[in-house]
Image (cartoon, rainbow, N blue to C red):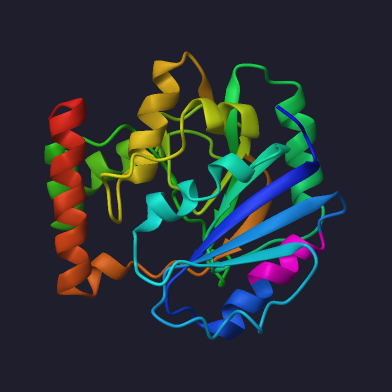
Amino acid sequence: MNVKFKITATIVLYNENVSVLRKTIQSFLEIPFSKKLFLIDNSLTNRLEEEFNHPEIVYVFVGKNIGFGSAHNFVLPELHSQFHLVLNPDVIFSSDVIPSLIKVLNKEPEVSFITPKVLYPNKDVQYVCRKHPTFFNLIKRKLNFSSRKIKNNEYQNQDLEKPFHPEFIHGCFMFFKTADFKQLQGFDERYFLYMEDADLCRKIDGIGKKKLYYPKVNILHQHQKGSSKSIKLFLYHLSSAFKYFFKWGF
């Protein structure tokens, strides 16, 4: 691979809160390496094109909502970098996070991507590490049934201040070795929204690699929990869940 940048990143946009997005983009632009950020806009208008006019930003207006995974995959041929960040539009992080993660990744040849500790804006911990989803565990989570089982599936029964290799890590900040992300061919585009990160973690298992949770550095994520608030998003989640379980088993 012809490496042109140390780091590339993609953020998929759809009717975003611009004030929050500005903070996310500024976090990326403060990374002290050569870099390129791709903004893939699934919105129906290109109102953000002039908002983020910067030499280290490439704005791509799709013109329709093609889904989360498809939008991230849109720039796969353009990813000429050592590392690639799959980034949500509501994440804030300091400039020392990426250099710290690079040092760890360079020592971990079996790891495809790394994720730091994820905090809510009030500094509570987000439990982004999970066991691989099962049909019944997903139902229990939606019904908030069996808190003991939920805690076990979120690895809450172990010391989360120490790095470890979870089965599945939620995808608000997935810092990849670009070569691995391209080998995996990015996300499965059959998922319009939700479960594509769980699917990608399964694909990583399939190439004999691992995921690493590294809580020595942290980021802030303004998690929206959209499928809990919207019938439409809940139905997207349900559709993706069935696609996932028919692919990987119930």
Q: Is residue 19 left or right of residue 40?
A: right
Residue at the spot 31% in from the left edge and 37% down from the top edge: 153
User: Taking the image as drawn, is residue 145 in sight?
Assistant: no
Residue 161 x %, y %: 61, 40
Residue 9 x %, y %: 64, 52
User: Taking the image as drawn, is residue 169 in sight?
Assistant: yes
Residue at the spot 51% in from the left edge and 18% down from the top edge: 209
Relative to the observer, which residue lies in front, 119 or 23? 23
Query: Where does the magenta region start and end?
Result: 24-30
Does residue 226 sit above or below 198 in this rendering? below
Q: Residue furthest right?
A: 32
Confirm whether the magenta stretch covers residue 45.
no
Q: Residue furthest top?
A: 208
In terms of secondary structure, what is the magenta stretch mainly?
helix
Toward which corner of the image does residue 102 lie, by quadrant?
A: top right
Relative to the observer, which residue lies in front, 65 or 248? 65
Relative to the observer, which residue lies in front, 53 or 118? 53
Q: What is the quadrant of the C terminus in the image?
A: top left
Residue 1 x %, y %: 70, 27
Toward which corner of the image does residue 234 lie, by quadrant?
A: bottom left
Q: In this view, does 83 lie to the left or right of 69?
A: right
Relative to the observer, which residue lies in front, 156 or 214? 214
Residue at the spot 66% in from the left edge and 84% down from the top edge: 50
Toward which corner of the image does residue 83 lie, by quadrant?
A: top right
Confirm whether the magenta stretch covers residue 29.
yes
Q: Is residue 98 left or right of residue 247?
A: right
Residue 151 x %, y %: 32, 43
Does residue 58 sit above or below 161 in this rendering? below
Does residue 177 sit above or below 40 in this rendering? above
Residue at the spot 39% in from the left edge and 43% down from the top edge: 197
